[in-house]
């Protein structure tokens, strides 16, 4: 019998297990935390499970929605797209609930003529072929070949960078425009063009359903894989089960970790592989979800993004019916200079409250409770000429029988991109076994 393992119980690992099940393969899934879900992360607040990340599900998330459908009985609710920012002392709002022409004109005014000329062909490429909204696609690989010698901050005019590009990169990649590259920007455009729902029971409800439905997947939570090495015709995982060191051999292993964590597995055994994976960039993010006595947001202004002078990249309502629950996200250079693992959560929340106080109902609105998480590795910002890095990875790994890689750096960091990357990698793994 061919033994198969997945390392990483985040969404990429869950997706890989899902597609392996379709091939009738039994899987051991290793997760170092005590529960699956990875950077989604869920904790209880006011008797309810709330999610730190990944909760918004686009209407174009075909693969992820098929997965949710097969789990059964999981209902969606509208979330939409609604965000504001302050420009020259005035609050400017973009919302999918507003007239489409109004939004187009507003985006054009924020981009300016030069920014519009740069943005329009990129947007058109994704609109004509939604597949271009993933990483490593022909159109954006050509863009990378021509322009990735300089970052996004040089590709777009300064006004466009400040008012449109930075709000996207700092929220989706945890990175400034000078830390992101044109060849990867299609994945950002696809997310902006979509409209969103969320699961009524949250991602936690979905993860609980996975635990009860996965008959051919053995969830080995609390098992931290520390090294991977080849031994004859097998791949040996060295891991810690509780406080006990252990090892297990498999014919086929799929690494479904963030690239920076995958690199650490091979630092001693395959330094060349580790170096390739280490080129992928990740930036930390801190998230606080806070419940208040009264609504913080009005119905038509449910979120706001902030400029590079503040560590708070954005603050928004947890859902359209949760205007009293604020999700604070701290990312970007200013956040990195002020917030770290050892930061006091209460002080971080107070900082966020001070920043949004001029715009929303925070003053004299009593804070009931909050949950907080510092996430590192956090958001993936990929690499310049990222398609070249992926090509090097595939060329290097092909000589190692039974070893495969998937993750947020393959097709993009969205849920849909992770499912697409894992589906493709499982197909490769299964077909290569037949060679």
Image (cartoon, grey):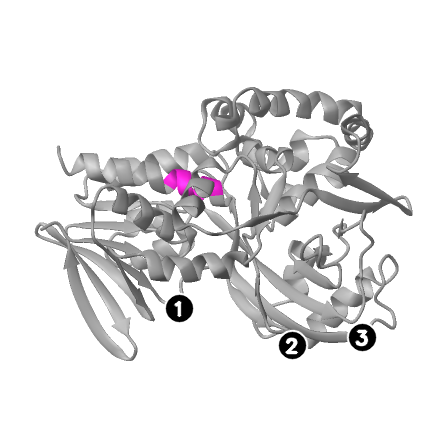
Bin the neighbour count of mark 2 within 10 Å (Cα to Cα): few under 14, some 14-19, many 20 and up: few
Viewer-closest of 284 and 150: 284
Question: In the image, what residue occupies the spot 20% across and 34% down?
Answer: 431
The verdict on residue 376 being magenta is no
Q: Which residues are magenta?
A: 416-421
Query: In the rendered structure, which disc, 1 or 3, sits on the residue that comes first in sequence?
Result: 1
Query: Which image quarter: residue 422?
Result: top left
- Point out which mark residue 344 bears: 2
Reading the image, the residue beneath label 1 is 33
Q: Position of residue 190 (x, y in %)?
A: 58, 33
User: Mark 1 touching mark 2, by CB under 8 A?
Assistant: no
Q: Quadrant of the C terminus?
A: top left
- Point out which mark residue 269 bears: none
Q: Is residue 67 left or right of residue 342?
A: left
Q: Is residue 282 above or below residue 105?
A: below
Query: Which image quarter: residue 223?
Result: bottom left
Question: Which residue reaches farthest right?
Answer: 89
Question: In the image, what residue occupies the spot 80% across and 57% down?
Answer: 297
Bin the neighbour count of mark 1 within 10 Å (Cα to Cα): few under 14, some 14-19, many 20 and up: some
């Amino acid at each position: 019998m061919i033994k198969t393992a997945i390392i990483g119980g985040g969404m990429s690992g869950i997706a890989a297990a899902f597609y392996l099940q379709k091939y009738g393969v039994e899987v051991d899934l290793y997760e170092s935390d005590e529960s699956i879900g990875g950077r989604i992360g869920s904790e209880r607040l006011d008797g309810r499970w709330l999610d730190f990340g990944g909760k918004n599900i686009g209407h174009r998330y075909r693969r992820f929605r098929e997965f949710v459908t097969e789990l059964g009985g999981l209902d969606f609710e509208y979330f939409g797209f609604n965000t504001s920012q302050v420009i020259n002392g005035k609050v400017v709002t973009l919302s999918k609930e507003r007239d489409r022409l109004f939004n187009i004109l507003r985006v054009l005014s924020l981009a300016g003529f030069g920014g519009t000329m740069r943005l329009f062909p990129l947007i058109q490429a994704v609109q004509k072929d939604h597949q271009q909204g993933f990483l490593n696609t022909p159109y954006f690989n050509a863009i990378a070949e021509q322009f990735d010698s300089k970052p996004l901050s040089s590709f777009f005019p300064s006004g466009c960078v400040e008012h449109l590009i930075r709000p996207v990169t700092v929220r989706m990649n945890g990175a400034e425009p000078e830390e992101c590259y044109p060849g990867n920007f299609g994945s950002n455009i696809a997310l902006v063009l979509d409209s969103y729902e969320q699961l009524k029971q949250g991602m936690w409800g979905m993860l609980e359903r996975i635990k009860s439905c996965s008959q051919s997947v053995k969830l080995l939570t609390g098992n931290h894989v520390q090294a991977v090495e080849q031994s004859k015709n097998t791949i040996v995982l060295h891991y810690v089960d509780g406080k006990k060191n252990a090892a297990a051999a498999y014919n086929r292993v799929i690494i479904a970790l963030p690239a920076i964590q995958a690199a650490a597995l091979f630092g001693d055994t395959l330094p060349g592989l580790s170096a390739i994976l280490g080129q992928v960039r990740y930036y930390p993010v801190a998230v606080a979800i806070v419940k208040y006595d009264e609504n913080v947001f009005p119905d038509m202004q449910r979120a706001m993004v902030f400029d590079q002078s503040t560590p708070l990249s954005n603050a928004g309502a947890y859902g359209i019916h949760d205007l009293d629950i604020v999700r604070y996200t701290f990312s970007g250079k200013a956040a990195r200079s002020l917030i770290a693992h050892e930061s006091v959560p209460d002080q971080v929340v107070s900082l966020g409250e001070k920043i949004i106080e001029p715009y929303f109902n925070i003053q004299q609105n009593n804070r009931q409770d909050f949950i907080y998480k510092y996430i590192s590795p956090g958001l993936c910002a990929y690499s310049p000429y990222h398609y070249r890095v992926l090509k090097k990875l595939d060329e290097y790994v092909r000589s190692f029988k039974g070893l495969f890689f998937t993750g947020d750096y393959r097709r993009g960091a969205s849920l849909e991109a992770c499912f697409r990357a894992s589906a493709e990698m499982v197909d490769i793994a299964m077909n290569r076994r037949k060679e």
